[in-house]
Every structure is written in C-alpha cells, then in structure tokens.
Image (spheres, rainbow, N blue to C red):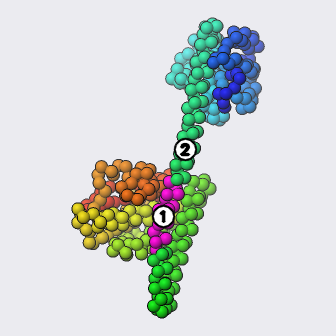
Amino acid sequence: MSLKKDNYKILIADREEFSHKNTKLILKDYKHKDKSLEFISSFNLDETKFFLKDNDIEVIIFDLNLVDLNYADGLNFINFVREELKNEIIRFIIRSGEFKKIEDKLISSYKIYEDFEYDFKDTTELTLPRYKACVTTALRSYEDLMTISNQKKILIEQSKSVLMGDMIDSIAHQWSNPLSIIGLIGLSIKHNMDAYNIDIDENKDLAKRLMSQVRHLKETLNEFRGFFRNDKKQEEFLIKDIVDNALMLSQDDLMKHKITIQMIGDLNIKSLGYPNELKHVILNIVNNAKDAFVIKSEDKSTKNIENRRVYIEIHKDNNIPTISIFDNAGGIPEHILPNIFNPNFTTKKSGSGVGLYLSKMIVEDSMSGKISVQNIGNGAKFQIELPL
C-alpha cells in the first residue's frame, strides 16, 4: 500500500445497481488532497473478496444487505478482512437502510460503536455533505494508519540492526574467555618445549583443554547463527551435563581468580529445550559472578573476599526444574537490580550490557522458561525455571 498514487480507490460493495450509480454520482467531483476517487463495483461477497485481494483499496463502502439481508454474514465479512486477509488499514463505511432495526444488535454483539475503524451510517440519512464527510474521515484515518504502519516497519528494521549489533557484541563477549584460555595453553606448551619438559600426559591434557575451547568457539557461532530460526528442535537433556560443560569451559579462569564452584541438589533432573543455548546462560551468570569478585578485589574501598564461592543448585520448585546460581560476592546494588536484564545496561567499564539481556531472551523467549535475580545474604542469586 502506498500513499503516492494519482487517486484513491473506493470499493462499493452493494447488490443494488442503483446504489452504485447514486454513490458515484454524489462523489464524482469529490477530491481529497487534490486527488480524485476511482470507483470499483462489486455486487456480491465473492467479487468483494476478489477485489480486496488484488487491489490497493483505501476505503470500502459496504452495504450490510449484500447477502440477502443477512446482516450477520455481512458483519462476519469484516472479520474476514481483518483476520484472514490481515488487512488492518482499509477503512469501512458500513451502510444499512434498516439501521434502527439492528442498532442494538450491532452495539451488543459487534461493538460497532466501540471500534473507531468502522463508520456506520443509516443510508436514509446519507446526504451529499455527510457522504463527503464520511469519505474524508475514512481517508484521513487510512493515511494516519499508513504513516504509523510505515513507521513501525522502519522501527522493526532498526531493531533488527540493533539486535544484530547486540549479537555480535555477545559473540565477542562469549569468545573473550576461551581465546584467553587458548593463549594461556599455548604459552604452557611453549614453556614446556623451551624447558624440554615433554610430559606426554600433561601435553595430552593441554591439547584436550585447547580443543574443548575451540569447540566452544565453533558452537557459539552456530548457536547464534541459528538463534532466531523457527526450525530449531528441542531436546531432552540432563541439567547436570549442561552445567558440567559450562564449568569445564570456565574452569581455568575460575582457578586463576581462586573461585570455588560447587554443584548441589538433585543431579538427575531433566528438562526440555536447547541445551547449548542454556549453557551460554550459565556461563554468562558464572562469569558475572567472577567479575564481581574481581571488581571487589580491585576496589580499595571494599574488603577483598578471600573465600570466593559460587553454588549451583539443581532442584524442583513447585515441580518445575530450576537452576539456582548464588555467590558471596556482595550482591547487586538495589537501585540497579530492576534494570539488570535491560538491553545495553551494564555497570562494567568495558561491558556491552547484552549478556544478561540475551540470557533472558534465551530462557524466556526461546525456552519458555523464566529467569529472575535477587540479593540474598552476602551475594546475588539467579534463578532459572525451565520446562519439564
């Protein structure tokens, strides 16, 4: 649909030939914004449906007795346009020669008066000035809705661009630790070679850890590439296995900062969803806890936390599989707690603010679960509720 046309298309849907001629005669010299009207005539519902599917029509002048005085069929046709054709913009001017007889039914059953998109007129009262007023109102409403529709399309495209940037930021964030660990493993191998310390078992372990990080990098790309695809297949998984995979990828960084992780609870609980996406959520929350410990240690105004711990509890809350991740890193300031899942919100100097935002998208939009956070004791607690 476009506003840049030489004229406006008006569809007259009425089974009486006289009504068509009369409407065209009344409106023949009408102009709106220096544009004339082009009339299309239909005499039954099948023709009306055909013209609506294949023509760029702004207004339909629709007589309710189009189908043997069956007003219900006529009104159901409006629902057909809105729901099946998905046309929310075309304007209706509904006519009836027996408006008074069905006025109560229209108000109670079809709520015509409560819906601004319909202009209902008694045919006997449609004088030339009122006809022109109806058409002018309908066209103005159409143009306003077209402007809103175009603005929405622009906003959607802008949102896609912003989200793409967020996804790239998140990939960079997810890659940061594995690349650092790969670098450290490479240095360890070089150190062993320089010192002629060739321990086969140790080198095998280094190679295993290196390949694990490389696999994680590749999986990250594949997962984010298919993040918004509709053909993803859910699978059943053991929650403990996903937590183990996430912790294996972060173990070097956690050891470096002397952070102890303990998994507790029922380790046999299963869930349904996308395990690799959930792994990124757990990784992100654990990394945030690690960052909180590091920030505390660098802040001279606060006491360094010596006994650094993160607990991951797998349990059922009201029979819902739940992962609770809590630490003793001092908690999250109460004034920022409500904003923590907002896009681009971060308290870190070099943070992108997309980690927890995407975590919420994964849990709630992709996996139909729920994620929340609160301060408990001397730390923060994230809770992830998953489908059975």
Identify the residue at horizontal 57%, vertical 11% (top origin): 100
Circle 2: element type = helix
Q: Which residue is more in the foreground, 330 or 36?
A: 36
Identify the residue at horizontal 33%, vertical 74% (top origin): 258
Label 1 and label 2: CA atoms lie apart by 24 Å
Q: What amino acid is at disc 1?
A: Gln
Residue holding disc 1 = 174
Is 35 located above or below residue 230 in the figure? above
Disc on the earlier residue, 1 or 2? 2
Identify the residue at horizontal 49%, vertical 79% (top origin): 186
User: Which residues lie in the magenta part?
Assistant: 166-181
Is 167 within the magenta?
yes
Callout 1: few (<14), some (14-19), or many (20+) C-alpha neighbours within 10 Å? many
Q: Is residue 147 left or right of residue 258?
A: right
Q: What amino acid is at disc 2?
A: Gln
Q: Which residue is more in the foreground, 185 or 126?
A: 185
Image coordinates of residue 300 in percent, x first then y, are 24, 64
